[in-house]
Image (cartoon, rainbow, N blue to C red):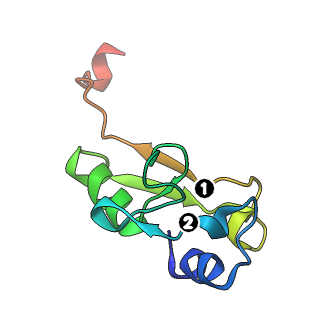
């Protein structure tokens, strides 16, 4: 979730019934049903970035979905594309 998506949830403009994300859950997440939190859950973007970086990912490309009225969104859901630094041993150019 970003500030934009939090606003869309709060004002009821989030698409696909996601305005029902009203119940606070662990680590700042919001869920539709506290009895079945995995069914629909929204994670704070700050938490997602923190988790990826703690696990060694350096580059993150976060593409926000149309569910919260993101201009130009290609898909409904948010997408995270993450990259880890290469762990391959580079050979000297003379060996190539």
When the figure is inspected, residue 21 is found, relative to residue 57, above or below; the finding is: below
From mark 2 to mark 1, how far is it between C-alphas?
15 Å
Q: Quadrant of the C terminus?
A: top left
**Disc 2 and disc 1 in contact, CB within 8 angstroms:** no
- What residue do we see at 22% from left, 23% from top? 89
User: In the shown orientation, is residue 22 left or right of residue 27?
Assistant: right
Task: Give the class, few, some or many, for how many residues have Cα within 10 Å of label 1's Cα (few <14, many ≥20).
Answer: some
The x and y percentages for residue 8 are 65, 79
- 2 or 40, which lies in front? 40
Q: Please give the label number shown on residue 95.
A: none
Name the secondary structure under disc 2: loop
Q: In the rendered image, which quarter is residue 90 located in? A: top left
Question: Could you tell me which residue is drawn at 43 percent across and 48 percent down?
Answer: 35
- Number of marks: 2
Tell me which residue sits at (78%, 68%) in the image.
Answer: 72
The image quadrant that residue 19 belongs to is bottom right
Residue at the front extreme, as displayed: 35
Residue 79 position, x and y percent, is 58, 50
Quarter of the image where one finds residue 76: bottom right
Label 1: state its secondary structure.
Answer: loop
In-front residue for pair 96/21 = 21
**Residue 33 or residue 71, whichever sits in front:** 33
Give residue 82's position: percent from left, percent from top: 43, 46
Q: Farthest top residue?
A: 95
Q: Residue at x 30, y 40 (%)?
A: 85
Which residue in the structure is indicated by mark 1? 78
Q: Which mark is residue 21?
A: 2
Please tell me whether residue 10 is drawn above or below residue 76 in the rendered image: below
Circle 2 crowding by C-alpha within 10 Å: few under 14, some 14–19, many from 20: many
x%, y% of residue 78?
A: 60, 55
Q: Earlier along the polypeptide chain: callout 2 or callout 1?
A: 2
User: Which label lies toward us, 2 or 1?
Assistant: 2
């Amino acid at each position: 979730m970003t500030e934009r998506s939090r606003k869309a949830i709060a004002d009821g403009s989030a698409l696909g019934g996601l305005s029902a994300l009203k119940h606070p859950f662990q680590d700042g997440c919001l869920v539709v049903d506290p009895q079945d939190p995995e069914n629909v859950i929204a994670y704070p973007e700050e938490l997602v970035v923190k988790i990826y970086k703690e696990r060694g990912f350096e580059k993150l490309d976060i593409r926000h979905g149309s569910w919260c009225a993101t201009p130009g969104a290609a898909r409904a859901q948010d997408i995270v594309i993450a990259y880890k630094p290469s762990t391959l041993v580079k050979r000297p150019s003379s060996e190539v």
